[in-house]
Image (cartoon, rainbow, N blue to C red):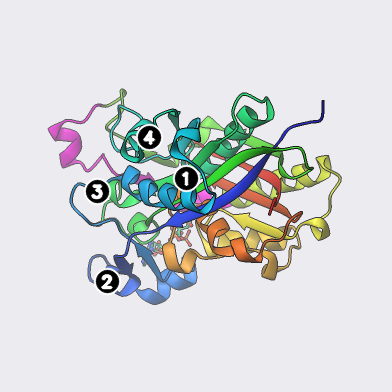
Amino acid sequence: MSKINAAITGVQGWVPETILSNKDLEKMVDTNDEWIQSRTGIVERRILKEEGKATSDMAVKAVQQLLEKTNTKKEDVELVIFATVTPDMLMPDTANTLCDKLGLSNAYGFDLKAACSGFIYAITVGAQFIQTGMHKKVIVIGADKMSSIINYEDRATCIIFGDGCGAVMLEPTEEDLGYQDAVLRADGSGREFLYITAGGSKKPTSQETLDAKEQYVFQDGRPVFKAAVKGMSSAITELLKRNQLTKDDIAWLIPHQANKRIINAVASTLDFPKEKVTVNIHKYGNTTAGTIPLCMWEWENQFKKGDNIVLTAFGGGFTWGAVLIKWAY
Ligand code: UT7
């Protein structure tokens, strides 16, 4: 029996219409457009502003279009893996909410929480279900409504993050295409640099935690920056070596969009040409689990069947890694 590979057969993104520009942020905190652009590469980001709208609502839009694009009947979807750190609610899972909202009546799903590495972890999990033959249609989503956990009085974080969503369809193929390999890593000691203090079982929300604004993301940027460059570069190096590939064999590098300087540093460390690196951070900022599928969606028309593509991410946890795929269409 030939090996079953997990091919990406479609990708779709969705971002909210409302734009929060650097100029807007200048009016909210002590910052300026020049600082933000030179330190991060971000010009603007999207915000899901409508009252009551949540992460699942962004995914509904993306997945609806993904189903149309891939000619998939709702009843044929078997599994939804939803990478997010901003679930609609702590319970139930956003994946199940999405299945209900879209009428994916034969699917089950679960959320996966690995911060900015959420999508690369999730696509790896999704690919296993296809490769074992257990499922034939798996949807993997990376989506975050970061505006719901950001303190817009904290200039260290509010300039970075935005809201957005991307989703891919995974299906079996016997061709040598699709998901190939991954180097995934984690180091829980990194939790001291990037976290949300309250709202979990360690410190449930109370008036005191709300007064201290502990429901929001805290980041000590410098150590995260350094660890991100080192983590992504070493994961890519290991992945290429293990697959007997050099940088010249890679058609595209799709890095997590956290900071343009981090992306440039990773590309320079690997001596990887900038033209082959997808960058859209100027438009969307850091959408956490959304950045990689949003890049895939934007560059989809430039990918060719058989292209070797490396996805790489680093985020809270710390979590990081690199995934090798062969584009399937
Ligand atoms: O996606 C999840 C993983 N996250 C990341 O990968 C993010 C990693 N970190 C970063 O991207 C960067 O560290 C930041 C963009 C968060 C910060 O950039 P930085 O170059 O590391 O700045 P810094 O925190 O070292 O601050 C430099 C200076 C400080 O002033 P002093 O102490 O030098 O006087 C800050 O107070 O810039 C100041 N500063 C700002 N100034 C204007 C910090 N934030 C701002 C701001 N506007 N928004």
Residues under labels 4 and 2: Cα distance? 36 Å
Q: Is residue 46 above or below residue 81?
A: below
Question: In front of the other: label 4 or label 1?
Answer: 4
Q: Amino acid at mark 4?
A: Cys
> Which of 66/282 is in front?
66
Q: Which residue is mark 1?
A: 142
Q: Amino acid at mark 3?
A: Lys
Query: Is the C terminus in the top left, top right, bottom left or bottom right quadrant?
Result: bottom right
Locate residue 61, reporting x and y percent.
37, 51
| Disc 4 + disc 2, Cβ < 8 Å | no
Residue span colored magenta: 204-227
Question: In front of the other: label 3 or label 4?
Answer: 4
Q: Secondary structure at mark 2?
A: helix
Res 24 label: 2
The first of marks 3 and 1 along the sequence is 3
> Which of 120/201 is in front?
120
The first of marks 2 and 3 along the sequence is 2
Q: Residue at x 33, y 60 (%)?
A: 16
Q: Label 3 crowding class (10 Å Cα cut-off): few <14, some 14-19, many 20+?
A: few
Residue 278 in view, yes or no: no
The first of marks 1 and 2 along the sequence is 2
Q: Amino acid at mark 2?
A: Asp
Q: Which residue is mark 3?
A: 53
